[in-house]
Amino acid sequence: MSLQEALESGKFVVTAEIAPPKGTNTDEIKHLLDLYDGRVDAINATDNQSAVMRMSSLALSKIVLDHGHEAVVQMTCRDRNRLALQSDLLGAHALGIRNVVAMTGDHVIAGDHKQAKPVYDVESVQLLQMIRSLNEGRDMMGTPLKGPTGFYAGAVVTPEANPLEPQLIKFAKKVQAGAKYFQTQAIYDITMFNIFMSHARKMGAKVLAGIVVLKNERMAQYLNDNIAGIRVPAGMIAELAAAPSKAEKLETGIRMAARLIRQLKEERICDGIHIMAIGMEERVPEIMKQAGLLSD
């Protein structure tokens, strides 16, 4: 079942994120793909996430496809101008990739090649418009293509931003530009997320809530202090702080993530989840099992 079919069927969809290797060895990637088999609906290939140089998201997406998974290629505007973006999109389609998430991309100052020159010829809304144009059989200049693309276009949003209004405006622009689904920044505050969803539902796009496991209270506090749009409630921080050891703090974080997922599903708050495991990819099936999404 394609990602589009899964979302449109009303199923509670699970996508997971895998970072390409920093090198050519894909053994760990293939192990994760085997581990995720039959458990997730689609797998995102990140695009030089956090501006750290890695194998291309396009190459990883092809590996994901070849292992029988539904692939979602992330494409950022940071590293490519409009020529390169269109070229890579046509190439992705030729390789069988049908799902794209359009992103502006983290600035290079955050990454491991700080002298790199950021491009940002277009931004995420314009990239979505570009994808729609390619789907209609034209390039950005209106020149007809020898065969249109057929992408299912997605985007990202920060639903717990404060103030929320700028995110809602951008969300609406992305929907108008052709985004059919959204994978969100990490969410922790259900009350805040419900407020966002009360607006998002009116616009018709599908929403997958971002899930990031908290490893300890220091990580939670760091996110609150340094990452715009993330709000870890004080109760969660206290719960992590009460755990007596490093291992037990991590298990507490996993239980909290599973509890959050279970609530999202049982209350049908959104259309699914997007798990960003960040170094804990092997624990994804366990998180899903604790959340009641897996029986094995």
Image: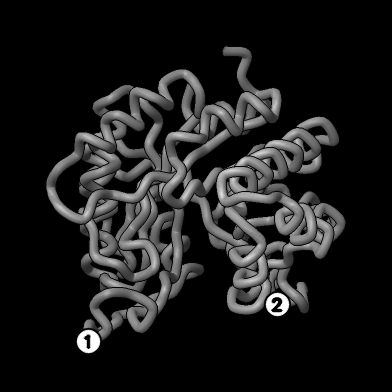
Give the residue type that dot 2 points to: Pro
Q: Is residue 189 above or below residue 59?
A: below
Q: Identify the residue under disc 1.
A: 115
Which residue is located at x 67 percent, y 72 percent?
224
- Front position in the image: 82 or 244: 244
Give percent across and percent down for residue 62.
24, 37
State the SS at label 1: loop
Q: Tag 1 or tag 2, which sits nearer the N-term? A: 1
Which residue is located at x 33 percent, y 67 percent?
140
Image quarter hosting the C terminus: top right
The number of callouts visible is 2
Q: Identify the residue under disc 2.
A: 166
Which residue is located at x 22 percent, y 82 percent?
116
Give percent across and percent down for residue 226.
59, 78
Give percent across and percent down for residue 178.
54, 55
User: For residue 31, which numbered disc appears in the image?
Assistant: none
**Dot 1 crowding, Cα within 10 Å, few <14, some 14–19, many 20+:** few
Q: Is residue 74 above or below residue 222?
A: above
Which residue is located at x 20 percent, y 34 percent?
27
**Quadrant in which residue 174 is drawn:** bottom right
Which residue is most to the front? 244
Q: Is residue 271 visible?
A: no
State the SS at label 2: helix
**Quadrant in which residue 291 is drawn:** top right
- Is 182 placed left or right of 94 in the picture? right
Q: Is residue 40 visible?
A: yes
- Front position in the image: 166 or 287: 287
- Is 266 placed left or right of 113 in the picture? right
Which residue is most to the left? 24
